[in-house]
Image (cartoon, helix red, strand yellow):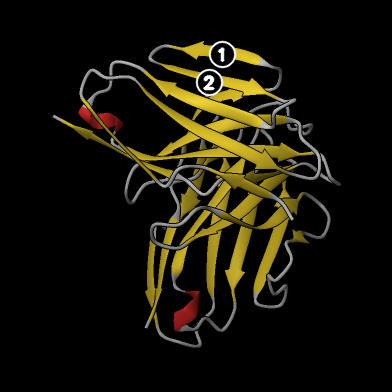
Amino acid sequence: GQSLEQPSEVTAVEGAIVQINCTYQTSGFYGLSWYQQHDGGAPTFLSYNALDGLEETGRFSSFLSRSDSYGYLLLQELQMKDSASYFCAVRTTSGTYKYIFGTGTRLKVLA
Amino acid sequence: GAVVSQHPSWVICKSGTSVKIECRSLDFQATTMFWYRQFPKQSLMLMATSNEGSKATYEQGVEKDKFLINHASLTLSTLTVTSAHPEDSSFYICSAAPGGSGNQPQHFGDGTRLSIL
């Protein structure tokens, strides 16, 4: 089967740095995406890695190691508004392309 | 940026009713759109891949006759929940990506919260 595992919950304080890990096992792999979802809202795109290495987008960075089937999202200078659920997603190549989502990590930022 | 519009945002209806949800790509053409379902505090579960001009591809365990998908144009896909029952109550979200090869990240509609009484 296909699976993407993430920690269920992470707690940190404002201004801190937090890393959310994602390990995946999929039939085919094309790229790893990260999405943020606030309660009651739809997911919004944060970052995408097709190749190994680090991608930086403002306060958010994402890393991928295809040989380890592993990636992470790094959030710096945490703000209260970053409290949300974060999902990794793999674009698979089996048949027509599609996206499989991880279990999700709920981030709580404390004042 | 790519914008995906989903309508309606909230539906409350009686058991046995059929409900249609629309997903539109506003500023790009989408040969492929995706429909997800999400229960509270859970992840997004892919229900089906909607392909313009052809039949949708359903994930294992998703009833084709229950969740009808139509992708009649490059900017519109619809999901119809037929004869809805309380267990169909959920948050339904569509997504699409510019281009047809999947090289662009997908963008999500705002979702439809469906409540069946």
Towards the viewer: A84 or B101: A84
* Residue at the (78%, 41%) spot, across then down: A97
- Circle number at residue A45: none
* Residue that protrudes farthest toward the right in the picture: A95
Could you classify mark 2 by the number of other residues whose Cα lies within 10 Å: few (under 14), some (14-19), or many (20 or more)? Answer: many
Residue A6, relative to residue A32: is it above or below? below
Q: In the picture provided, is A103 more to the left or to the right than A77?
A: right
Q: Is residue B88 above or below residue B42?
A: below
Where's residue A45, x and y in %? 50, 31
Using the image as rendered, state which of residue A99 and residue B96 is in the foreground: A99
For the point 50% across and 53% down, which residue is it? B43
Instruction: Name the side, left or right, on which B102 lies relative to B27.
Output: right
* Rendering coords of residue B14 (x, y %): 40, 85
User: Can residue B27 be seen?
Assistant: no
Quadrant in which residue B28 is drawn = top right
In the image, residue B99 lies at what x, y percent?
73, 29
User: Which residue occupies 70% across, 71% down?
Assistant: B61
Q: Amino acid at mark 2?
A: Ser
Whether callout 2 and callout 1 share a subunit is answered yes
Q: CA distance from mark 2 to mark 1?
A: 5 Å
**Residue underneath mark 2:** A62
Q: Could you tell me if the residues under marks 2 and 1 are in contact, i.e. CB atoms within 8 Å?
A: yes
Q: Regarding mark 2 in the picture, which secondary structure is present there?
A: strand
Q: Residue furthest left?
A: A111
- Percent across and percent down for residue B58 are 74, 62
- Residue for badge 1: A55
User: Is residue B3 positioned above or below A59 on the image?
Assistant: below
Q: Chain of mark 1?
A: A
Classify the position of the N terminus of chain A by image quarter. Answer: bottom right
Label 1, secondary structure: give it: strand
A32 vs B79, nearest the viewer: A32
